[in-house]
């Protein structure tokens, strides 16, 4: 005991402890044994960046038509002498779809991770607790009733109208859920999930009302939310969702440290000097923006937000400074891969990608639900 | 110096504690005692800046409600009664929260800081253990190590730092109770200030330099343990039958309970 006190109060130069900052190697297995997973987290982020690049290139060369790796190589590195048909397939059909898939996957996965940090709850997911349906309601509102808006407003917003409406839908739901689900800084899983079900049902009913009064063209546009698909990808959609999701990715480093502070609850975060109110506002806006933009361009693709962060936590731990960027990279890779599968599995037809993610994600969600004993999440 | 006058701490609209006047000095352990529901934790939470208050409460000469959160975090650490963690962190990752969030980078590297904080709570070598696999007492000591990381040097810019402990030993065995109180005493002896809510009167007698006795939200006695821990006062405070004796060596009081009837 006296020795413990001495180590605490002594002012002499200490001996080098394991994990000392000076000359720390990038990664050692020893760090993991010490409970320090930051090294492996950095390694995993590098590998995931490579994975995303590889998956995107692979997806460009796969599809119903015969445009393959050879064509891609000659278009990018060779003479560039390819037929106009191949050029259109590569650069106007597949490339925007791959880029959009990466953006949406990153947006949904980061939304999930941020939401789980904010609700201090590993089961939060924008699809499960109704945030996506809120965003869908916002988008449906614009599709059906957008014509009633002043023409000048519609012209000014242009193709950002849909993402903006989806953002406000998602923002309303997230704020409402947080108000309902959180009592004195503690979020109850049951309250959150049940409130999410009620809110999703309400949004669904409102979307149903909009469907009821929609005309044929609007119905066709609306139908696409139910399924969730990247099939409508084009450069306009990339340009409308890209900046929003890009901003979210830029905001990640600001959120990571603060969300770590929330691990022990809001009171402890406050004790450690974190401005909890500001952090919560920032997290809610981030989640709404990322979910809103994703839903606006691709409809309700579920479960990416819960599967990706959960898998990553198993390997690199819950540290949000690493979890958020890693989620963005893995989310992008997984969605592009799932989209590629949906394109080639039943070619020349397509499976809606939402079906694939739900088939894989729903059992995963149940597995997480059953395996969370020991964590104090009520 | 931590001082309060005409202090009234509110939860919602209700004043739970009122009319509190005291001064706590750096270099000492100030214990807050009193029966359940007497407002001990509420008083502590007013002093840590968690609850709104009326009157004056100054930490190192600055009004606490006017101090921004960052500045408060630099000058005081808080160990709450219970801490829950919703994600599977390792012990190192929990303790590191205190180290990475602190605004004042000391001479120690992060790794050294964590190792020393864990050593001081007798948990050296626990760095890689999953936090959720630990016993309640071990978890409580990990939390104390986290708080120590935040305010490791007991002084900052020449001013003392303050360690607020809300029932720090309630889930610990006797050896670790003594050890945690020794950590608190070492912190005070190195120039910091300690304010602790305590239920154990004998620990209070052993370690406190000043005792604040609360009953029904009012301060009923303030002073050194041998002045405040008297048979009459403690009987009246807790409304039960007990007697206070003196340990032959050191003239510290000890409390021997007899029964629940006063």
Image (cartoon, rainbow, N blue to C red):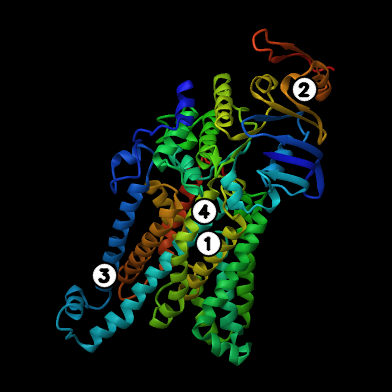
The chain ID associated with circle 4 is A
The residue under label 4 is A259
Q: How far across and how far down the image is residue A279, in percent?
A: 57, 58
Q: Residues within 10 Å of mark 3 (few under 14, many from 20)?
A: some
- Viewer-side label of 4, 3: 4
- The quadrant the C terminus of chain A occupies is top right
The chain ID associated with circle 1 is A
**Separation of residues labelled 4 and 3 (CA atoms):** 34 Å
The chain ID associated with circle 3 is A
Above/below status of A98 relative to A251: below
Considering only order in the chain, which callout, 1 or 3, is on the residue closer to the N terminus?
Answer: 3
Q: Residue furthest front?
A: B158
Name the one closer to the observer, A337 or B6.
B6
**Separation of residues labelled 3 and 2 (CA atoms):** 77 Å
Q: Residues within 10 Å of mark 4 (few under 14, many from 20)?
A: many
The residue under label 2 is B228
The residue under label 1 is A126
Q: How far across and how far down the image is residue A237, in percent?
A: 43, 79
The residue under label 3 is A57
Considering only order in the chain, which callout, 1 or 4, is on the residue closer to the N terminus?
Answer: 1
Is label 1 in a helix, a strand or a loop? Answer: loop
The chain ID associated with circle 2 is B
Residues at discs 4 and 1 in contact (Cβ within 8 Å): no
């Amino acid at each position: 005991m006296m020795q413990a006190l001495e180590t605490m109060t002594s002012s002499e130069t200490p001996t080098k402890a394991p994990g000392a900052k000076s000359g720390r190697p990038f990664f050692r297995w020893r760090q993991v044994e010490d409970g320090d997973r930051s090294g492996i987290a950095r390694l995993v982020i590098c590998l995931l960046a490579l994975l995303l690049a590889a998956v995107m290139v692979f997806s460009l060369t796969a599809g119903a038509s015969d445009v393959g790796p050879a064509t891609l190589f000659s278009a990018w590195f060779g003479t560039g002498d390819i037929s106009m048909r191949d050029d259109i397939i590569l650069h106007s059909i597949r490339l925007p779809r791959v880029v959009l898939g990466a953006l949406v996957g990153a947006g949904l996965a980061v939304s999930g991770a941020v939401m789980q940090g904010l609700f201090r709850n590993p089961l939060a997911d924008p699809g499960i607790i109704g945030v996506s349906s809120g965003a869908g309601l916002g988008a449906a509102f614009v599709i059906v009733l957008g014509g009633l808006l002043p023409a000048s407003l519609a012209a000014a917003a242009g193709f950002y109208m849909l993402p903006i409406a989806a953002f406000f839908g998602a923002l309303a739901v997230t704020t409402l859920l947080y108000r309902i689900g959180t009592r004195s800084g503690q979020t109850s899983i049951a309250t959150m999930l049940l409130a999410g079900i009620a809110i999703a049902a309400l949004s669904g009913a409102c979307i149903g009302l909009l469907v009821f009064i929609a005309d044929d063209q609007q119905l066709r546009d609306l139908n696409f939310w139910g399924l969730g698909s990247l099939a409508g990808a084009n450069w306009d959609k990339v340009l409308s969702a890209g900046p929003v999701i890009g901003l979210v990715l830029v905001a990640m480093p600001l959120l990571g440290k603060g969300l770590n502070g929330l691990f022990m609850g809001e009171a402890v975060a406050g004790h450690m000097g974190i401005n909890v109110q500001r952090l919560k506002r920032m997290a809610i806006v981030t989640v709404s923006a990322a979910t809103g933009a994703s839903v606006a361009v691709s409809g309700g693709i579920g479960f990416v937000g819960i599967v990706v962060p959960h898998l990553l936590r198993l390997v690199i731990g819950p540290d949000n400074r690493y979890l958020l960027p890693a989620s963005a990279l893995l989310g992008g890779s997984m969605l592009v891969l799932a989209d590629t599968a949906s394109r080639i599995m039943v070619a020349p037809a397509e499976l809606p990608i939402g079906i694939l993610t739900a088939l894989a994600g729903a059992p995963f969600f149940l597995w997480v639900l059953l395996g969370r004993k020991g964590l104090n999440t009520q | 110096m931590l001082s309060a006058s005409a202090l009234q701490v509110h939860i919602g609209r209700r004043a739970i504690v009122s009319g509190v006047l005291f001064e706590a000095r750096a270099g000492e352990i100030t214990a807050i005692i009193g029966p359940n529901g007497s407002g001990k934790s509420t008083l502590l939470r007013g002093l840590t800046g968690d609850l709104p208050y009326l009157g004056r409460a100054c930490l190192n000469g600055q009004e606490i409600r006017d101090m921004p959160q960052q500045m408060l975090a630099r000058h005081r650490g808080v160990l709450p009664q219970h801490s829950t963690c919703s994600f599977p962190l390792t012990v190192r990752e929990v303790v590191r929260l205190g180290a990475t969030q602190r605004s004042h980078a000391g001479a120690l590297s992060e790794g050294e800081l964590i190792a020393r904080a864990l050593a001081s709570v007798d948990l050296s070598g626990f760095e890689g253990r999953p936090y959720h696999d630990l016993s309640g007492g071990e978890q409580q000591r990990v939390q104390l190590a986290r708080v120590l990381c935040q305010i490791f040097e007991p002084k900052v810019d020449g001013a003392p730092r303050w360690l607020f402990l809300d029932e720090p030993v309630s889930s610990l065995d006797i050896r670790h109770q003594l050890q945690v109180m020794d950590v608190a005493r070492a912190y005070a002896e190195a120039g910091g200030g300690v304010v602790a809510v305590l239920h154990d009167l004998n620990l209070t007698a052993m370690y406190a330099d000043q005792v604040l006795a609360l009953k029904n939200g009012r301060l009923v006695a303030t002073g050194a343990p041998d002045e405040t821990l008297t048979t009459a006062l403690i009987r009246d405070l807790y409304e039960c039958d007990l007697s206070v004796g003196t340990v032959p060596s050191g003239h510290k009081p000890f409390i021997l309970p007899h029964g629940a009837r006063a």
